[in-house]
Amino acid sequence: MQKPNIKDGANYAPKASNAKQKSVVAPNTFHFSVAFLDHGHINGQTNGLLQAGATLKYVYDSSPQRIAAFCKMFPQAIVASSFKQILEDEVTQLVASAAIPNLRADIGKQVLLSGKDYFTDKSPFTSLEQLAQIKQTVNETGGIYSVYYAERLHNDAANKAGELIKSGAIGKVLQVICLAPHRLSKQSRPDWFFDKTRYGGIITDIGSHQVEQFLCYANVHDASINFARVSNLNNPDKPGLEDFGEVSMTADNGASFYARVDWFTPKGQQTWGDGRTFIMGTKGSIECRKYNDVARQAPASKLFLSDEKGEHEIDCLGQSSFPFFGNLILDCINRTETAMTQKHAFKAAELSMKAQAFADNR
């Protein structure tokens, strides 16, 4: 198994271990194509679909450099001459994309209107207006607008946490706390990364990961914003960058949520971010050390469980098959919602954008 680059968050592309791969379809029975490679998360999206048995057909991007890098990783891809070629292809059933964030909704609309399903990197939108338009398009077409919330969907400890919660290991979830530092790597970032009109703000962007975890772990259908703040604390040369954000919410079922997102992973840390999730339940608690176990192991994916029987450390690294991807393929085939409901995917984006607006208007 090729190891992902654990220092580079922008191009971090996890894979299930060979022993955990689970194809849900036979070869050449479910085809997807890839378009717009602006963010390196497209490699993780592609890995997940391939390992679940999907067949990659076309790739399209306006940059020859990005196309060359993608085809080096995935040589089976056929380079399309245009995005239109993918939209008109009768074999392609799903289009995966990691475009500049403010362009993702329009690309998705084109995909849905072409009769295909769409799998976009997070954040799926940069405005509530885009969300409203896509909701209408989904209703009209019956298509799937799926989102790559990778910090839960493509992480071993995060998947294990969901399994334990579902089994009742910690009772009813009362609170979720997410800490999400990221490495800035300022010199390697494209111009759009520092333009808020294009990336949508730090809570809209990174924060959508954290909100999605809250909705999943605490079984939340809606929430209200208590507090949100964003700032540029240490990058005056990039005035469009928000390098720090935090948000607090209370769910419709009473569960509480706090998240901190930032671009302050120190240079000496072995991974791109020391992402942590703390989950408190009525019968126990969980801590996920998702990428790093500071001064002990890197990469790492650890889960610490305290319950009525005692204290447990679980090494999760390489133990998940990442079932989201196989379920997404089957959803596209069977027109079901087993990977993630459409309402859930949209609600995570909606709440992160509402929190961003709260912070912007303080």
Image (spheres, helix red, strand yellow):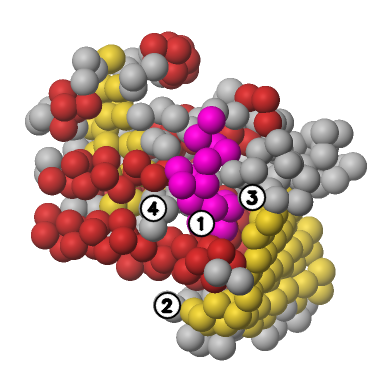
Q: Which residue is mark 2?
A: 221
Q: SS class of the residue under badge 1?
A: helix
Q: Quadrant of the C terminus?
A: bottom right
- Whichever of callouts 3 and 2 sits on the residue coming sooner in the sequence is 2
- Mark 3 residue type: Glu
Where residue 125 is drawn, which disc sits there?
4
Q: In the image, what residue occupies the spot 50% across and 35% down?
A: 192
- Mark 1 residue type: Thr
Q: Which residues are magenta?
A: 191-206
Marks 4 and 3, how far apart at CA? 17 Å
Where residue 204 is drawn, which disc sits there?
1
Q: SS class of the residue under badge 3?
A: loop
- Whichever of callouts 2 and 4 sits on the residue coming sooner in the sequence is 4
Who is closer to the viewer here, 163 or 187?
A: 187
> Residue 234 placed where, x, y %?
78, 45
Q: Which residue is mark 3?
A: 242
